[in-house]
């Protein structure tokens, strides 16, 4: 049997492997003591982390938010009570009394400000068209974490029913609270599904229960270490609770993937005749190189989320880097120590040659017909990606939650029975001492009210609808002029406008000629600004990912062409992901089976997160396969034989690792939150496409077509790689003479 490449003695990974073997007992004791400590710290992370709102620091809407709070003592009405009359209408004496009572009770709460009710303000925007329902609006002061924690107790108290009215709780804060609550519940459900399913799959892959349990243990170590790290980071800077969901799936997935790489190499070395401890060192030296390069690509991909000025996305960057660090430590330190002690219980019960026979035949077929097989695979991928041409980005709403959720029901009832959307007010403010008089304020308010998406505009000059003064100034008119001489207007949009192009509405209002410099805020403006800033940073994020991963792959392979091809192939797999998001979630295919309501658009922040996650995971398999192909090419000098050998030895492992990752991510298909469904299903589909058509067909086909060009690099870059590229493998004692490469296939 051909001897696998041996570790180069002085290399850093070889030294790491030797330390892990020599200090195996101490390392295992420390790991055993550390695991429960991390468990205690990490278990409380989901409850200790924070919640976010849809705003972008430094934008116009956030400046308005600050002015509203500091100058006018007001802000978005983020809490809504829908009061439904059980008999009569909302103007009957019994319902009036109940509505006033509910409003008064709400106003007594210490965190509640700006209570507005139909029965106290007689605002037509707060009354349903058929008179059966009316609204009480209020503002909960505090950050998202504080207000939603308070709502957990307050919402059940406010939800009431008696002989005259039914009271239900809604509003943006209640929707967001229930999204977070659902996500936390889904996190626990996913844990209950993932752990036994993954353990069973690993037993089938390894055919050794001990190997499966230790691999799951390293995955759990990655998860718990990440959660504990996130909790500590949260003491310095805010970390989103949703980062815990990513920590679970990515921690298990990467921890298990990296263990599979190392254990597979250990088994090869043992089968080649190395003693147990030497085989453990060799596994770290060679497979550890793959693990480190793979970890770098995943960490870089997720770290690029830091270009977005939102702690919601920054939190995923922290989680990604922590997961990689923990998974790499688990696979290159803890696992080799275990192999040194119990490696004989990990060894394969069947000859390894049997496992790669199918993939070897597949590789030879692809290499014989690279154009035919490559074009066929490319056609399938382009067809799967084609729905992306209809991609439409939109804003989040209550349909993120499952049908029947109380806050979603309130939002849907409001949309059906009210002409206006008073919970989504747009606020317009001026600078201090703007010099506006009542006449010019009235003219501007009238002009804004003529916009087809506006129900009414309230100002110190009264309430304007469709360009006309509908109501004279009320008792609160003085509050529309700030103590600093500034002016405040509130613009109430129609239901139709909020169901349509909200960013377009905001842009049109901002572009309306004004007698002074007005800035617009409020929830519609905040979400629009969030989307605008997010999309403006996407090119920078994508460029950083592409450049950084190309550099990493160059350091791995020493080739200029292979990193570029890997980038193109990864973009193909990402096309499949975006195509699936459009076809399933935007257009609503399988919505009944999957249990969600399509919105006709995709909220952009989750696809950006998925872009980073899936790009990193796709490179995971790219690094593993290319690393083995390069190892064989360094030994034999024959690209054709190297590709066959690389696929024969890695394809079974890539298939197993991909299957486990698919199961891990697909558990979120059961989530009640659409964002998590998108993350789970989209990522699972990318992994499937990447581990089959891309890595097993397009990669070998493209390498066959490129021939010698696969390994080309200019002289300066070649010398740079020779000096800085990480390599731990030595050629066999007497390598065969290098074969002449065939010219690239035309």
Image (spheres, helix red, strand yellow):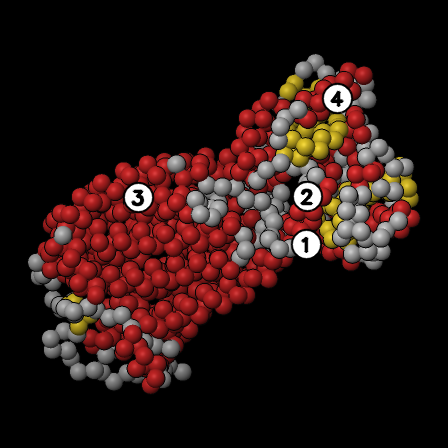
Residue 60, disc: 1
Of discs 3 and 4, which sits in the foreground? 4
CA neighbours of label 4 inside 10 A, class few (<14), some (14 to 19), many (20+): some
Question: Who is closer to the viewer here, 119 or 729?
Answer: 119
Local packing at callout 1 (Cα closer than 10 Å; few below 14, some 14-19, many 20+) is some
* Observer-nearest of 370 and 216: 216
The answer to whether residue 225 is seen in the rendering is: yes
Q: Are marks 1 and 3 in contact (CB under 8 Å)?
A: no
The residue drawn where x is 54% and y is 49% is 584
Q: Which of marks 1 and 4 is nearer the N terminus?
A: 1
Q: Could you say which disc has been placed on residue 100 in the image?
A: 4
Q: Is residue 280 left or right of residue 654?
A: left
Labels 2 and 1: the sequence-earlier one: 1
Which residue is at a point 57% across and 40% down the rendered structure image?
143
In whole angstroms, how far apart are the C-alphas of marks 3 and 4?
A: 53 Å
Q: What element carries label 1?
A: helix
| N-terminal label among 2 and 3 | 2
Residue 579 locus on image (x, y percent): 53, 57
* Residue 129 on image: x %, y %: 80, 32
Instruction: For label 3, count other residues whose C-alpha is less than 10 Å away and answer few (under 14), some (14-19) or many (20+).
Output: many
Q: Is residue 193 above or below residue 665?
A: above
Q: In which quarter of the image is the C terminus?
A: bottom left
Pointers 4 and 2 in contact (C-beta within 8 Å): no
- Distance Cα–Cα, label 4 vs label 2: 28 Å
Front disc: 1 or 4: 1
In the image, residue 107 sits, relative to residue 613, either above or below, namely: above
Q: Which mark is residue 70?
A: 2
Residue wearing tag 3 = 220
Which mark is in front, 2 or 1? Answer: 2
Q: In which quarter of the image is residue 539?
A: bottom right
Instruction: Identify which residue is drawn at 80% across, 30% down.
Output: 121
């Amino acid at each position: 049997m051909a001897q696998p490449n041996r570790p180069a003695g002085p290399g850093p990974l070889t030294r790491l492997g030797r330390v892990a073997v020599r200090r195996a007992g101490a390392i295992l004791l420390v790991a055993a003591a550390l695991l429960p400590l991390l468990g205690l710290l990490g278990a409380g992370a989901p409850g200790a982390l924070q919640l976010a709102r849809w705003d972008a620091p430094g934008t116009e809407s956030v400046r308005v938010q600050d002015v509203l709070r500091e100058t006018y003592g007001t802000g978005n009405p983020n809490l809504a009570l829908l009061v439904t009359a059980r008999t009569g209408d909302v103007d009957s004496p019994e319902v009036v009394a109940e509505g006033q009572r509910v409003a008064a009770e709400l106003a007594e709460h210490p965190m509640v400000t700006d209570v507005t009710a139909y029965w106290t303000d007689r605002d037509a925007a707060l009354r349903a068209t058929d008179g059966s329902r009316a609204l009480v609006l209020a503002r909960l002061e505090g950050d998202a974490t504080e207000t939603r924690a308070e709502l957990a107790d307050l919402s059940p108290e406010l939800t009431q029913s008696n002989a005259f009215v039914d009271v239900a709780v809604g509003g943006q804060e209640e929707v967001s609270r229930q999204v977070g609550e659902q996500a936390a519940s889904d996190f626990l459900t996913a844990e209950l599904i993932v752990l036994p399913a993954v353990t069973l799959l690993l037993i089938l892959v390894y055919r050794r229960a001990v190997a499966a349990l230790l691999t799951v243990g390293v995955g759990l170590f990655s998860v718990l270490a990440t959660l504990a790290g996130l909790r500590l980071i949260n003491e310095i800077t805010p970390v989103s609770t949703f980062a815990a969901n990513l920590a679970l799936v990515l921690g298990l997935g990467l921890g298990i993937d990296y263990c599979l790489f190392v254990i597979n190499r250990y088994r090869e070395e043992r089968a080649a005749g190395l003693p147990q401890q030497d085989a453990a060192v060799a596994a770290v030296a060679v497979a550890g190189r793959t693990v480190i390069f793979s970890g770098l690509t995943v960490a870089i991909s997720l770290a690029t989320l830091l270009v977005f000025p939102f702690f919601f996305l920054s939190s995923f960057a922290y989680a990604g880097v922590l997961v990689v660090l923990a998974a790499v430590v688990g696979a290159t330190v803890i696992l080799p120590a275990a192999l040194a002690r119990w490696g004989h219980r990990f060894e394969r019960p069947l000859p390894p040659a049997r496992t790669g026979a199918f993939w070897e035949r597949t590789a030879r077929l692809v290499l014989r017909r690279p154009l035919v097989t490559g074009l066929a695979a490319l056609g399938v991928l382009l067809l799967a990606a084609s729905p992306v041409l209809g991609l439409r980005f939109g804003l989040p709403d209550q349909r993120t939650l499952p049908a029947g959720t109380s806050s979603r029901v309130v939002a849907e009832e409001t949309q059906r029975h009210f002409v206006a959307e008073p919970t989504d007010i747009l606020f317009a403010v001026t600078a201090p001492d703007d010099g506006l008089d009542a006449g010019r304020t009235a003219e501007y308010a009238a002009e804004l009210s003529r916009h087809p998406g506006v129900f009414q505009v309230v100002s110190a000059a009264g309430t304007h609808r469709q360009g006309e003064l509908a109501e004279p100034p009320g008792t609160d008119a003085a509050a529309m002029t700030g103590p600093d001489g500034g002016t405040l207007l509130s613009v109430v949009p129609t239901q139709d406008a909020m169901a349509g192009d909200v960013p377009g509405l905001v842009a049109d209002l901002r572009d309306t000629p004004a007698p002074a410099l007005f800035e617009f805020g409020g929830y519609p403006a905040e979400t629009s600004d969030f989307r605008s800033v997010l999309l403006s940073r996407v090119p920078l994020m994508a460029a950083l990912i592409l450049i950084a991963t190309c550099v990493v792959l160059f350091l791995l392979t020493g080739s200029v062409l292979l990193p570029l091809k890997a980038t193109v192939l990864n973009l193909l797999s990402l096309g499949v992901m975006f195509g699936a998001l459009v076809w399933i979630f935007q257009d609503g295919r399988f919505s009944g089976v999957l249990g969600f309501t399509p919105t006709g658009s995709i909220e952009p922040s989750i696809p950006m997160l998925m872009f980073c996650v899936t790009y990193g995971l796709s490179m995971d398999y790219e690094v593993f396969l290319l690393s083995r192909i390069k190892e064989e090419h360094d030994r034999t000098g024959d690209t054709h034989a190297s590709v066959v050998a690389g696929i024969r030895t890695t394809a079974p492992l890539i298939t197993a690792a991909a299957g486990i990752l698919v199961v891990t991510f697909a558990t979120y298909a059961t989530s009640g939150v659409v964002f998590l469904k998108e993350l789970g299903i989209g990522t699972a589909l990318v992994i499937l496409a990447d581990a089959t058509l891309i890595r097993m067909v397009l990669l070998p086909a493209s390498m066959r077509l490129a021939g010698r060009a696969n390994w080309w690099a200019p002289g300066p870059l070649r010398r740079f790689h020779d000096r800085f590229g990480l390599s731990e493998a030595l050629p066999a004692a007497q390598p065969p003479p290098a074969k002449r490469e065939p010219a690239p296939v035309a």
